[in-house]
Amino acid sequence: MLSRFLVHRIFFGLKRAHHGTLHITRRVLAALGLTAARFDLLYAVRKGRRGIIQSALRKVLGVSRATVSRMLGSLEELGLVRRTPHEEDRRQKLVELTTKGWWRISRAHRHFTRSGWAQLAIDSALASEHAAFHWCDENACLTATASLHVMLGRIRRGFRDFATLDYPSEGEEIITWFDYYDSDDLDMWPETIAGLDRERT
């Protein structure tokens, strides 16, 4: 049985690792007008391709109904999402990205994830503790990352965290037409995007 000291040390380590990831991502996301929570929500809506039912977002993100409602309200004010009654069930709301929202999350995802920046941050953190995991050794990094992913999954299940949002591993993500745009094309604001949104409504 683990001693109380060790359990407290593990809890403290998990908490500090969580704050560490938020610290290094906060500046990157803030430059794009996002927070980590907004990034997750917009990404979840984007994965739905044609939108997602609001009640489903609660399960995907593993947060309360009130939290989802509050976040969607702020994202609507920013013009990044829209909510409309679902065609098949008028009691449900369909959440969709606006053109501006699609541009914003795609640009953030390209900059933060598809660029390899997030993977490099994890690889570098692992390399600082374990000499065998060097960020320049792709196989060692993939092995270390996979082990960490499994361990975090066990901890999450143990703490009854059943959020289902999953970011794909390298090479798993389906490429869409949007992924072919250059980074300069992702900076077409605000006039062009506002015009595209007017055309869609």
Image: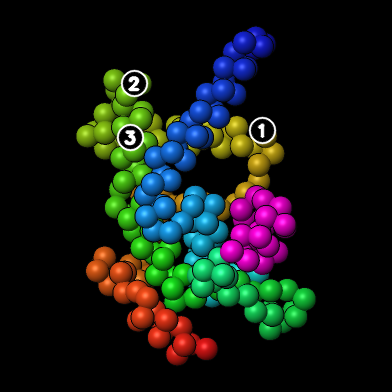
Asked if the residues shown at circle 3 and circle 1 are in contact, with their CB atoms under 8 angstroms apart, the answer is no
Residue 19 image point, x, y percent: 50, 34
Q: Is residue 175 magenta?
A: no
Tell me: 125 left or right of 6. Answer: left
Q: Which residue is mark 2?
A: 130
Where is the N terminus found, in terms of image quarters? Answer: top right
Q: Which residue is mark 3?
A: 123
For residue 158, the mark is 1
Depth order, front residue of 168/57:
57
Q: Is residue 69 magenta?
A: yes
Nearest-to-viewer mark from 3 and 1: 3
Tell me: residue 42, above or below residue 10.
below
Residue 2, image quadrant: top right
Q: Which residues are magenta?
A: 54-74
Which residue is rendered at x = 66% and y = 33% of the image? 158
What is the spatial separation of the Cα atoms under label 1 and label 2, in whole angstroms? 26 Å
Secondary structure beneath dot 3 equals helix
Depth order, front residue of 109/72:
72
The amino acid sitting under disc 3 is Asp
